[in-house]
Image (cartoon, rainbow, N blue to C red):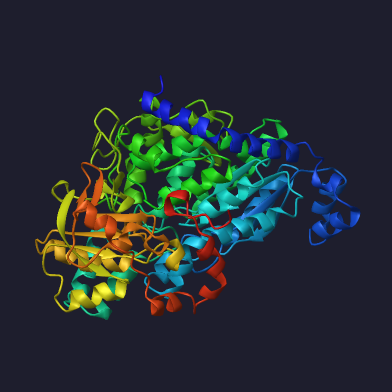
Amino acid sequence: MTIHPTVAAVTDRIRARSGPSRSAYLERLTAAAQRKPGAERMGCANVAHAFAGMPVNDKLKVVTEKALNIGIVTAYNDMLSAHTPMQTYPDIVKAEARRHGATAQVAGGVPAMCDGVTQGTPGMELSLFSRDVIAMATAVALSHDMFDAALMLGVCDKIVPGLLIGALQFGHLPTVFVPAGPMPTGLSNNAKSKVREQAAQGLVGRTELLQAESAAYHAPGTCTFYGTANSNQMLLEAMGLHVPGTAFVAPGGAMRDELTREATRTVLADVKAKRYAPIGHVVDERCIVNAMVALLATGGSTNHLIHWVAVASAAGIVIDWDDFSALSDVVPTLSHVYPNGSADVNQFQAAGGPGFIIRELLDAGFMHADVLTVRPGGLREFAGEPALVGDTLTWNTVLESKDTTIVRPASNPFSPTGGLKLLKGNLGRSVIKASAVPDDRHIIEAPIRLFDSQEALHVAFNAGELNRDVVCVVRWQGPQANGMPELHKLTPPLAVLQGKGYRVALVTDGRMSGASGKVPAAIHVSPEALAGGPLAKLLDGDVVRLDAVAGTLQALVPDAEWDARPLATMPEALRVANGFGMGRELFSGMRRNALTAEQGALSWV
């Protein structure tokens, strides 16, 4: 199938733009790959330290037999339901490696915080930059430099981007990502949202709300809505960095354990067969574009307009929101999973899942098929759905949708365009998850109400001050101001206002991911207010027009007046409060150095 001309054009301009930085990256990668293996290259004391804790037989394999050694980087902890199943993975990997004459070591662990636990608390202000901490921790783990290949154990929001950024610093290593799968379906996302809205109105109390939340989030595995964590898994499939079809297989059981063993076999096979497919070569411009296309086709998390800019940068590739926008204009929406629809990811998997989506996008020319992946069969292998026949893994091609209310072919999409829209205007550049918003809400024009925090908006809502058409502007929420937390606490009150018939919208330099639900939200406004962005010019009562059809975000203020307006400054009390408590002191350098959201909010440049 010929690649779609827009996809080809975007890929070409990314390649041209990235030429110098990508070439420099590949030169470093080649130099690292040409060295002798670690056990031969390192000094005797280094080698002795590296393998001192190994079982005697493993130690002999590495030193005497020059066996391959896999480095495991794990994000396991008990705070993330998605990561608790990974407690047993290292032992599974080590046992499988031994069966193939190799060894494996846990090279290191990375911190992994749950946004669901920290949402709306000061801890959430560490969330975005935890990605960079995870990347650094991955580098620390792999800097032991005794590995022939690597496995990355992680699933959730910042963890996968962080692991990926860190792994790309060791781009000479064949690397496979190993997920854990979603929890079983519990209380539906729509039912959960209704209870949250009732709680926001005082119609139910804490007991009823906790019961609903506990019924929704109730078991090991990833949360079942299509937020950042599950978008991560879809993108890794599209990039060819998983064992095919691994993303949404449930935790526990024979299938999941065998897929983890297969990840071990996969990464060893690449080395043994001398098939040169290290992660730094797998993740090229075409691979990044494939990930962007998969995100758009599935209405994935807006967080990836930040994270994948950072991931691409780690491989010497430069992308921006114009690239996402150009692709979104032509890539069809092929799935409806909450918040874009009512289905959860378990239903998405049952209807066809990533295999169906990838096959449709390949056949329609929206994805590059001529890419390296962790498998010798290339990206076509990722159009399959795994099955366990006895003790043997097989893959079946997903030929058609099993539920066209959830996934559809490219010939009959939910929408001819992607789920994300770039907004531009005198308020800066931002994005909106248009696929989650009803068509009659794609254009909102109303007077604004300015807020400096989520809490201030809740106070106004509880006082009845927002019972009108209103655009709520919450500023001082960008990377430099407070680490750019997700503002999920805003969803229930805004949804209540919209449910009453008011025309409401949110504009913020913070993040919302998929949590905005059906409320129009212009998020990630760049540059942020603290960095001199135009949100700092707004005054209460200004009329703002959010137009997701035309792709504009505009303060309807005469040009001369707008140009003459001074920039407001962040309240000193808020600045002080953002800098202390819950470990925020340790992140001051990251806030100070952070680039814009469109530049990936990078803190290490």
Q: Is residue 385 visible?
A: no
Look at 45% across and 43% down and name the residue there: 235
Q: Is residue 19 above or below residue 472?
A: above
Task: Where is residue 372? Give x, y as percent.
Answer: 56, 31
Q: Is residue 449 visible?
A: yes
- Residue 241 placement: quadrant: top right
Task: Where is residue 430? Give x, y as percent.
Answer: 33, 51
Look at 34% across and 42% down and name the residue there: 298
Q: Is 386 or 204 nearer to us in this picture? A: 204
Task: Where is residue 236? Give x, y as percent.
Answer: 49, 43
**Looking at this rendering, what residue extends furthest in the right direction?**
44
Q: Is 601 or 164 nearer to us in this picture? A: 601
Q: Is 603 or 419 nearer to us in this picture? A: 603
- Residue 571 placement: quadrant: bottom left
Look at 90% across and 54% down and name the residue there: 44
Tell me the quadrant of the picture where the N terminus can be found: top left
**Looking at this rendering, what residue extends furthest in the top direction?**
2
160 relative to 356 in the view: left or right: right
